[in-house]
Image (cartoon, rainbow, N blue to C red):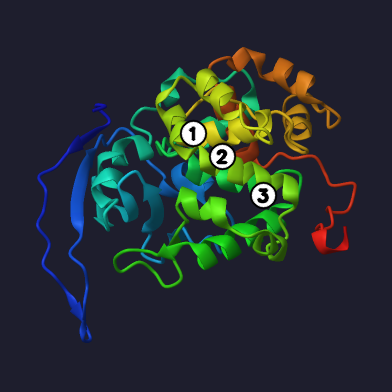
């Protein structure tokens, strides 16, 4: 285990009863945190949230981050919060132990922010201001791959809506005392069996739904990519028709905690990077990669810091209108 986090003795909690319904007993793990290392849960885990109504992700008023995941052992709910000098986590469900075992990697214990050397003033300032940013590694491919497929070539609002509808309809309620409305995403077999009219109701066209189904049918092969080197992992994912460089990068950034896997093929990112680093809002992928070349090995982190800097080109065109596949 990384020196950034060290396990504390496991605490046996007391079962709490609310009304007449017993609250399931959680499994608990506390991790001592190096006081010299800042950790911002929102920045670190934020990329796992798919829109404000994501049924698998919630942040509550007490600062806790709740996640519901489909692990190799089944569905699990994880609650993470920072208390004093420690990270405290509780987990419920058959996937709970798996989630607790992966907690250090989830919180960036395998990430090395010191490897990033700013070459631009904007990135130096943002890097200092966002010292709590760590690149998460979930170790789970399908939970990032499927929403990334849904986000292909549509507005984020459309993709988030489809994710919400499908997870709530075909997933299962979160184990344990999770906030109301939280669900574990469907298992691979269920994704593969969703009928065409339900994809249509979620406004997911045939190309995207077919890509999800193909991936679901070989989900075990997809999940193996979490243990591969990022470049090899991306090649594995891109064997599936309908999964290209954009989708594989968006997935492996999250599942593998890959600091160099920059997203290409994005409608907005090249222009944002070009504007931030060179004042060029017309930059394409090639120009973006050239600008990010000094950050080889850390290009994804550099792109994240640019997005966090808030320096984006002024909008000239109206937002894209949502697609309506019923009209096609």
Q: Which residue is mark 3?
A: 209
Image point (87%, 62%), residue name: 327
Could one spot residue 151 in this view of the protein? no
Marks 3 and 1: CB-CB under 8 Å?
no
Q: Badge 3 local density, few (<14 within 10 Å), some, or many (20+)? A: many
Name the N-terminal-most of marks 1 and 2.
Answer: 2
Q: Looking at the rendering, in which quadrant would you find the N terminus? A: top left
User: Residue 219, position in %: x, y?
Assistant: 48, 39
Q: Badge 1 local density, few (<14 within 10 Å), some, or many (20+)? A: many
Image point (57%, 46%), residue name: 146
Mark 1, secondary structure of its residue: helix
- 35 and 139: which is toward the camera: 139
Seen in the image, is 113 located left or right of residue 34?
Answer: right
Q: Is residue 62 above or below residue 219?
A: below
Measure the C-alpha gap from mark 3 to mark 1: 17 Å
Quadrant of the image occupied by residue 111? top left
- 31 and 262: which is toward the camera: 262
- 328 and 87: which is toward the camera: 328
Mark 2, secondary structure of its residue: helix
Residue 222's tag is: 1
Name the N-terminal-most of marks 3 and 1.
Answer: 3
Image point (47%, 62%), residue name: 171
Name the N-terminal-most of marks 2 and 3.
Answer: 3
User: Residue 145, position in %: x, y?
Assistant: 55, 41
Residue 215's tag is: 2
Marks 1 and 2: CB-CB under 8 Å?
yes
Q: Badge 2 local density, few (<14 within 10 Å), some, or many (20+)? A: many
């Amino acid at each position: 285990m990384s020196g950034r986090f060290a396990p504390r003795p496991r605490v046996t909690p007391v079962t709490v009863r609310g009304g007449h319904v017993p609250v399931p007993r959680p499994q608990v793990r506390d991790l001592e945190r190096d006081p010299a290392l800042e950790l911002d849960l929102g920045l670190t885990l934020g990329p796992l949230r798919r829109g404000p109504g994501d049924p698998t992700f919630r942040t509550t008023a007490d600062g806790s981050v709740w996640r519901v995941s489909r692990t190799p052992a089944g569905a699990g709910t994880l609650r993470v919060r920072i208390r004093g000098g420690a990270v405290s986590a509780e987990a419920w469900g058959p996937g709970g132990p798996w989630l607790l075992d992966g907690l250090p990697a989830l919180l960036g214990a395998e990430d090395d922010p010191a490897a990033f050397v700013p070459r631009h003033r904007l990135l130096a300032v943002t890097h200092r201001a966002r010292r709590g940013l760590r690149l998460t590694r979930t170790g789970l491919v399908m939970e990032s791959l499927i929403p990334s497929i849904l986000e292909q070539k549509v507005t984020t609002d459309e993709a988030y809506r489809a994710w919400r509808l499908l997870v709530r309809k075909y997933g299962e309620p979160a184990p344990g005392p999770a906030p109301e409305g939280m669900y574990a995403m469907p298992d691979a077999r269920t994704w593969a069996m969703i009928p065409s009219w339900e994809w249509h109701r979620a406004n997911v066209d045939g190309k995207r739904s077919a890509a999800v189904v193909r991936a679901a049918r070989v989900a075990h092969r997809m999940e193996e990519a979490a243990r591969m080197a990022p470049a090899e992992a991306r090649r594995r994912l891109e064997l599936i028709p309908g999964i290209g460089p954009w989708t594989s990068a968006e997935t492996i950034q999250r599942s593998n905690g890959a600091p160099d896997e920059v997203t290409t093929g994005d409608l907005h990112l090249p222009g944002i990077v070009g504007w931030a680093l060179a004042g060029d809002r017309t930059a394409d992928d090639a120009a973006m990669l050239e600008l990010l070349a000094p950050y080889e090995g850390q290009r994804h982190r550099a792109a994240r810091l640019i997005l966090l800097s808030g320096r984006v080109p002024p909008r000239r065109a109206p937002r894209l209108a949502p697609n309506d596949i019923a009209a096609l």
